[in-house]
DNA sequence: GGCTTTGTTTTATA
DNA sequence: GTATAAAACAAAGC
């Protein structure tokens, strides 16, 4: 499940491998993944253009293309962006192929076809899914505790649901939300307006910590996620509650519980998270 | 063949 | 308009 650390890891890899490459051709095998504009326009507009820069915003990958357009890719659940030699055969989930210089391809693989690609004018993100409406970047320098506290104004909903809301804060998904709430010692069933200042401070620090460590270990690989070189991450070995149902809590030894909050599988320690 | 998975969008409700 | 909760949707693996 590519969340902020996984997307960041992929972007770091892509920066090293495909920046300054020319897109010689685009092969679209699944037109349904091209969300905007129509697939034919998408292909023609990218052909012959240079990839100038790549960055991340939330879980979105943003390519700066030479004529001022932005290619935007969201991996959703099972999307992969891989750099492969162009003579290597495609697998059955390779749906979009960007043919690059040096006999290399940038390939979009997607088992469940939930991922989406957009090509928009520079900075015009309205056509690119939820990109225009994202909340703050949790790892940005300017994202201070004061800013974090301000996000809670007039918010009363369940804290887990709120952290998953990309318009509240960008980049957290199910894995890092569960891990951050555990690290902060906050029960995922709590409401946002029940958190006192000290708990918000703990949560603020926990979010930054788990995301940074997630990046340090190259992301979390359960089933599908790999980086741009096809390598798995290692943060799955460091998880304390996510997918640890029935395991012992690393802090207190009691049993990790799995429940369902906001329609999502939610893992926590009933002893440590009050 | 129904259930599960998650990120996001849509719809309904207060 | 605003906030929230729930449902819907994408599609394949088991």
Image (cartoon, coloured by chain):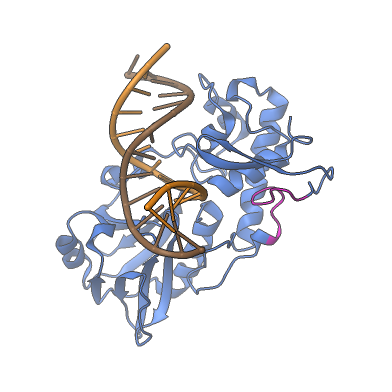
Chain colours: A blue, B orange, C brown
Q: Kindly indicate the quadrant of the structure image that contains residue A67.
A: bottom left
**Residue A11 visible in the displayed image:** yes
Residue displayed at 58% across by 63% down = A221
Q: Kindly indicate the quadrant of the structure image that contains residue A256.
A: top right
Residue displayed at 48% across by 34% down = A168
Residue A161: x %, y % from top left = 53, 33
Residue A259, compared with residue B12, is above or below; it is below
Residue A103, compared with residue A98, is above or below; it is below
Residue displayed at 20% across by 61% down = A42
What is the span of residues highlighted in magenta in the rendered image? A237-247
Residue A80: x %, y % from top left = 43, 65
In-image side of A154 versus A243 (left or right) = left
Q: Residue furthest right?
A: A252
Residue displayed at 35% across by 85% down = A102
Residue A79: x %, y % from top left = 42, 61
Quarter of the picture holding the C terminus of chain A: top right
In-image side of A75 versus A173 (left or right) = left
**Residue A139 visible in the displayed image:** no
Q: Nearer the viewer, residue A212 or B7?
A: B7
Q: Nearer the viewer, residue C12 or A131?
A: C12
In-image side of A180 versus A26 (left or right) = right
- What count of labels does the image hold? 0
Q: Is residue A86 magenta?
A: no
Magenta residues, dominant SS class: loop
Residue A193: x %, y % from top left = 60, 20
């Amino acid at each position: 499940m590519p969340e902020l650390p996984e997307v960041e890891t992929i972007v770091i890899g892509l920066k090293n491998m495909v920046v300054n490459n020319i897109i010689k051709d685009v092969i679209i095998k699944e037109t349904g993944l091209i969300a905007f504009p129509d697939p034919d326009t998408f292909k023609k507009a990218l052909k012959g253009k240079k990839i100038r820069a790549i960055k991340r915003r939330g879980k979105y990958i943003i390519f700066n293309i030479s004529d001022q357009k932005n290619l935007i890719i969201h991996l959703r659940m099972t999307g992969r962006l891989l750099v492969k030699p162009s003579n290597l055969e495609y697998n059955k989930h390779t749906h979009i192929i960007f043919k690059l210089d040096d006999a290399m391809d940038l390939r979009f693989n997607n088992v469940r076809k939930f991922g989406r690609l957009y090509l928009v004018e520079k900075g015009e993100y309205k056509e690119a899914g939820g990109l225009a409406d994202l909340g703050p970047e949790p790892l940005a320098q300017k994202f201070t505790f004061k800013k974090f506290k301000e996000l809670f104004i007039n918010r009363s909903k369940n804290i887990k649901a709120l952290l998953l809301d990309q318009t509240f804060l960008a980049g957290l998904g199910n894995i890092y939300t569960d891990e951050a709430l555990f690290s902060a010692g906050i029960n995922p069933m709590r409401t946002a307006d029940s958190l006192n200042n000290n708990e918000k401070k703990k949560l603020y620090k926990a979010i930054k910590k788990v995301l940074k460590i997630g990046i340090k270990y190259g992301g979390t690989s359960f089933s599908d996620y790999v980086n741009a070189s096809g390598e798995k991450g290692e943060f799955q070995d460091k998880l304390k509650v996510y997918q640890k149902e029935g395991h012992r809590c690393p802090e207190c030894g009691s049993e990790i519980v799995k429940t369902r909050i906001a329609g999502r599988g939610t893992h926590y320690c009933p002893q440590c998270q009050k």
